Image: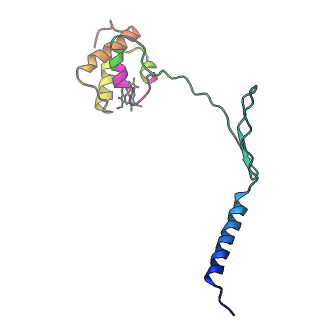
């Protein structure tokens, strides 16, 4: 029996590859429905018996920054790198001493970049915001 020539092997390999590509390519994919001007489009993609549809989600509101007040800029600089403002805003009314302990915990335990001079200003911000500034320190 005659051995196949190199050219014949190459042609067979190319033809085989093309056949596989066409077979797995499908070719019956439908494009997403075009957006209509009246109703919002319901994006859906279907192929080979599978249908993928998009859905909308609404994330809860979250304060991006701390509200204005004395030293608000400092607080926004020091307190937004790890968690949102709601972490501080959701606290119950705390005394100055309790705020100081919280700020020191952020600094000492979690390594928040807070200088020693920043602590009284940050405490002042929160106690002013909560109306607890007059509470005598313990
Ligand atoms: C380096 C990261 C980091 C920074 C910066 C940071 N925090 Fe936190 N904070 C944390 C972590 C982590 C927790 C979660 C602690 C827990 O779940 O017990 C937390 C929790 C809190 C809580 C919830 C109560 C508590 O004691 O756990 C408050 C209030 C708070 N942070 C305020 C602040 C304030 C005010 C600042 C700025 C002075 C600040 N954080 C900056 C990491 C940080």
- Residue 85 quadrant: top left
Query: Which quadrant, please, contains the N terminus?
Result: bottom right
Query: Which quadrant, please, contains the C terminus?
Result: top left
The spot of residue 84 in percent (x, y) is 44, 26
Residue extending farthest front: 7
State whether residue 51 is above or below residue 39: below
- Residue 58 quadrant: top right
Residue at the spot 23% in from the left edge and 23% down from the top edge: 116
Residue at the spot 70% in from the left edge and 61% down from the top edge: 24
Of residues 114 and 94, the one drawn nearer to the viewer in this rendering: 114
The spot of residue 119 in percent (x, y) is 27, 20
Of residues 132 and 51, the one drawn nearer to the viewer in this rendering: 51
- In this rendering, position of residue 3 left or right of residue 92: right
The spot of residue 99 in percent (x, y) is 34, 18
Whether residue 95 appears in this view of the structure is: no
For ligand 1, give the image quadrant. top left
Of residues 62 and 41, the one drawn nearer to the viewer in this rendering: 41
Q: Is residue 14 magenta?
A: no
Whether residue 30 appears in this view of the structure is: yes
Of residues 85 and 109, the one drawn nearer to the viewer in this rendering: 85
Residue extending farthest left: 116
Q: How is the image coloured?
A: rainbow
Residue extending farthest top: 134
- In this rendering, position of residue 42 left or right of residue 72: right
The count of marks equals 0
- Residue 56 quadrant: top right
Q: Is residue 79 magenta?
A: yes
Residue at the spot 54% in from the left edge and 22% down from the top edge: 61
Q: Which residues are magenta?
A: 75-86
Residue at the spot 63% in from the left edge and 76% down from the top edge: 10
State whether residue 29 is above or below residue 33: below
């Amino acid at each position: 029996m005659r051995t196949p020539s190199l050219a014949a092997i190459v042609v067979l390999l190319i033809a085989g590859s093309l056949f596989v590509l066409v077979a797995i390519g499908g070719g019956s994919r439908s494009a997403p429905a075009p957006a209509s001007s009246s109703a919002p489009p319901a994006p859906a993609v279907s192929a080979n018996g599978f249908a993928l549809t998009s859905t909308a989600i609404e994330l809860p509101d979250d304060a991006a920054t701390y509200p204005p007040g004395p030293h608000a800029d400092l607080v926004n600089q020091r307190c937004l790198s790890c968690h949102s403002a709601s972490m501080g805003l959701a606290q119950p009314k705390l005394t100055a001493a309790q705020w100081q302990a919280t700020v020191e915990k952020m600094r000492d335990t979690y390594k928040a970049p807070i200088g020693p001079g920043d602590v009284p200003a940050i405490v002042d911000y929160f106690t002013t915001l909560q109306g607890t500034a007059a509470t005598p320190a313990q």
